[in-house]
Amino acid sequence: EVHLVESGGGLAKPGGSLRLSCTVSGLTFTKTWVSWVRQAPGKGLEWVGRIISKNDGGTTDYAAPVKGRFIISRDDSQNTVYLHMSSLETEDTAVYFCACDYGDFLDDWGQGTLVTVSS
Amino acid sequence: SYELTQPLSVSVALGQTAKITCGGDKIGARSVHWYQQKPGQAPVVVIYRDNYRPSGIPERFSGSNSGNTATLTINSAQAEDEADYYCQVWASSTAVFGGGSKLTVL
């Protein structure tokens, strides 16, 4: 069974940084693409970015609101994908989900981790 | 940037058919995916690539996509189908979600 677990959420100040982790089990991680999706309180889903497998190039893509501030990386030895968030804004307050990215649709989502950006 | 438009809310009587639409420019040329999200839970894909149903998703869920509108259809809607539903496509190397539709089963 595929299982994704996010961690690292919490309170950060505007302008601050935070790193989220997404640990994956139940499949061959080296072949796995992972997307991050966030959901502000009471709002809809917003795609943040993704990282593809190293076998497929290891490249990343980002949504416009986070480009230049967020970086996605992976450590295949730890079956983990990271979301490095910097220059945080209050608008970044959301539950952050990671999900397996099958090239077009997202399946096997984690339970999410809450990030609150507030002074 | 590409935009997807969904109705904010859809209501359906128990056992009747619900249709949730997702509008976008020439969306019929794209692959559309649908997610169900219940309160406090992560989303679950219920239809992928326009009309494919993942294992474990009831047969009453189906999808179609043509022209400028994609549609999620729930036949014989059940109480447990009450949830938020989101459509999603890829455009210019970014995933785009619709604003979401709240399905109420009366």
Image (spheres, rainbow, N blue to C red):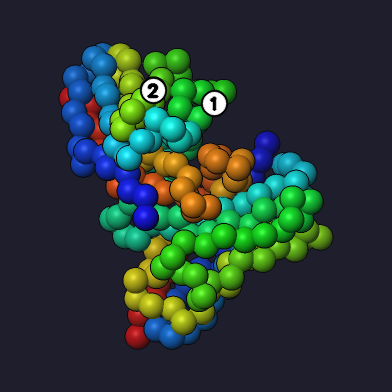
Q: Position of residue A8 (x, y in %)?
A: 56, 69
In front: label 1 or label 2: 2
Image quadrant where one finds the C terminus of chain A = bottom left
- Please state if A77 lies on the left or on the right of A66 as rendered: right
- The answer to whether A23 is drawn above or below residue B33 in the figure is below
Question: Which chain is disc 1 placed on?
Answer: B
Tell if the residue under mark 1 belongs to the same chain as the one under mark 2: yes
Image quadrant where one finds the N terminus of chain A = top right
Q: Are there few (<14), some (14-19), or many (20+) residues within 10 Å of tag 1?
A: some
Q: Quadrant of residue A95?
A: bottom left
Residue with the mark numbered 2: B64
Sequence-wise, the earlier of marks 1 and 2 is 1
User: Which structural element holds mark 1?
Assistant: loop
Please tell me which residue is depicted at 49% across the width and 52% down the height of the picture.
Answer: B92
Instruction: Tell me the amino acid under the disc marked 2.
Output: Ser
User: Mark number for residue B54?
Assistant: 1
